[in-house]
Amino acid sequence: MRQKTLSFLKPIFGIGDVSNNNQISNAKLGFKLKNRNLKIVLFSPFLFILFFLAYLGVVAFEIYKSGNNLYKSANLLLDSFRNQDLSNVKQNLLTAKNYLLDLELAYNKIKWFDKLPFLGNYVGDFGHIINASKHMFDGLEVIVDSIDPNLFELDKSVNGSNSANLTDNKSGFLVKIFPSIVDNSDQLIEKIGLIDNEISYLNPLDYPEKIGNFSLRKKMNDYISTFGVLNMFASQAKTLIEVSPYLLGFESKRNYMIIFQNDKELRPTGGFITAYTLAKVENGNFEPILSSDIYDLDDNYTPTIKAPDPIIKYIKGPYTLLPNLRLRDMNWSPDFKESMKTFTDEAKKAGITNIDGIIAIDTEALLKIVEAIGSVYVPNYGEYTSQIISECNCPQIIYELESFASVEGPVVWSENDPGKVVFAPENYDDRKKIIGPLMNALMHNAFNLPLEKTPLLLKAIIDSLVEKHILFYVFDSASQNAIELAGIGGRIEYFQGDYLHINDANLGGRKSNLYVTQEVDQKINVLKNNEIEKIVTITYKNPEKYDGWLNSILPNWLRVYVPEGSELVSAEGFWEKVEPYSELGKTVFAGYFELRPQGITKITLRYKLPFVLEGDFYKLKIQKQPGKKPFLYRVNIGSISEEFDLSTDKEFSYKI
């Protein structure tokens, strides 16, 4: 039998005879070994992949478990804030921090994946989110530590209160803890900066727009933008935080005059002054006392200051017989402090006394706040939203406010008494009633806003401050200095270098600034002798049709502020222009033009700067006019070209 087997195997292995048994055995063994090695070689990648997937599965489960625990604890933390159950805030915060630590430990097991292509970006982003969360919890801990000594007292005051006096109890508590929060402001500002640094690495475009019904990309953009603006503002606002107890009435009651500037009828400091509210602020609480129309205030005022020539010439109306400045037109200086000094001095003669300062707010600020809140219901006036409506192709709140601010139809003043209105449209006088109730409703909604919407509201307020839709002028010198350092005083500033401020004034009484856009091109030429020549082109466009109310011809008085001593070479596009003059430490190029609906107007200024280029760097500061939306600016100098939307004041340094 054995012989048969060997004989059978002979042709397969090439065996000569039975005497070669050892050769047969070795050949047979070699064949088996080769096949086994081949199987091991072929099977090893699958083993590695299985092991890798098992490892990922274990780590993914750890991340999911820790993340889920963190999510639940964060919700408990939010609930404790919402319910003013601050006795649990500290414990919930500690629990959330512990779960975040667990999440970080799990993440560290895959941290090395951030070196991988594609997947590495998301792993790296996850690490930045964890770091940002750690800084956020640290910031919350700073706040909680500030209020810790008063937790028991807060619980008694809040839990034992009814809804009628809950706000007062909160305010009383704020009086006690506010100094502690101010004392810790440095730490809070530092944490905000660290959070902003971490989330600035995230790119929302790397992520899907939506996951189910959740708008992921929008939410990412909201938070990145919020902390970016908050960090920029916080770094400038240290002194403002220090004087905030004074401004917010924690030391004693403050009285403010809040003026409503209609930016759709643009004026030098942000808009035509259409209405005002007198309000008191005590322990952080806002309470309107009186709201009225600016024309009512003008009725109690005897004009004594000669009006600027452009106002007399182009507004006409009451200035035809008496060319003295009305209160409503006293924000003529582009420097808010200078305008308000004149305004408050003259308003005293009309009965506005015992105020601590002026707060100016425009329609764009109200729109931003309503967008963050969602909608605002004003008793007796209805609901206000940011929804675009067909009546004006604009937000509903803007349409309604413009309806109050300018009821359609002519207003006729008396020839014998230019301050007296002898004819006005029906319900003309009703517009004064909305401002106080609207402000009160906004404050109420903001104070009772769900905590998850707080970042959006905070961003809306800070954006409004940074973009100059809210301005402050107060009589206390230390507080005013802090306001100016924070950049919310609307000042025309000194700058060592090139400077540009473009200031427009609508002198027609219509609201056509609602649709007007603006583009600014600066071409900077360094000549052979290092002299600097600039060509500034300002393009105004109105894309909408004429309607005779919100959109009609825009009669615009333009002033361009440049470094003092600049020499005008040529000016094109003005219907009428004046000789250059000095004001506020600048040289001013000014003139008049009109922009029609669906029209375009270009103003081109060529001028030489009063200094030569020294060194390798060219410095430029551009100051935005209050009330304007972000408009497109372009700067070209040599081979350098930069394009941006000017949303706030900016400084630049270009290497030549």
Image (tube, rainbow, N blue to C red):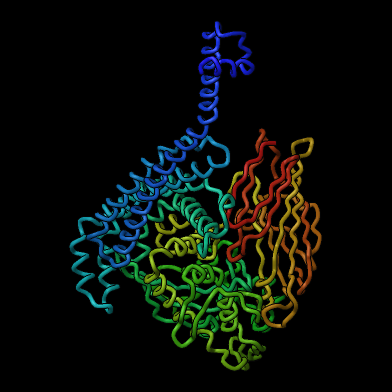
Residue extending farthest to the top is: 19
Q: Position of residue 226 (x, y in %)?
A: 49, 56
Confirm whether residue 329 shows in the render: no
Q: Position of residue 193 (x, y in %)?
A: 44, 46
Relative to 160, does residue 535 appear above or below in the rendering? Answer: above
Residue extending farthest to the front is: 1
- For this view, does 311 lie left or right of residue 405? right
- For this view, does 276 lie left or right of residue 582? left
Confirm whether residue 209 shows in the render: yes
Relative to 128, does residue 539 appear above or below in the rendering? Answer: below
Q: Position of residue 313 (x, y in %)?
A: 72, 75
- For this view, does 281 lie left or right of residue 218? left
Q: Nearer the viewer, residue 265 or 458?
A: 458
Relative to 193, does residue 554 appear above or below in the rendering? Answer: below
Residue shown at the point (49%, 85%) measured from the top left: 382
Image quadrant in which you'd find residue 632: bottom right
Q: Nearer the viewer, residue 273 or 365?
A: 365
Residue shown at the point (58%, 78%) measured from the top left: 396
Image quadrant in which you'd find residue 166: bottom left
Image quadrant in which you'd find residue 389: bottom right
Residue shown at the point (57%, 75%) measured from the top left: 387
Q: Position of residue 610 (x, y in %)?
A: 70, 45
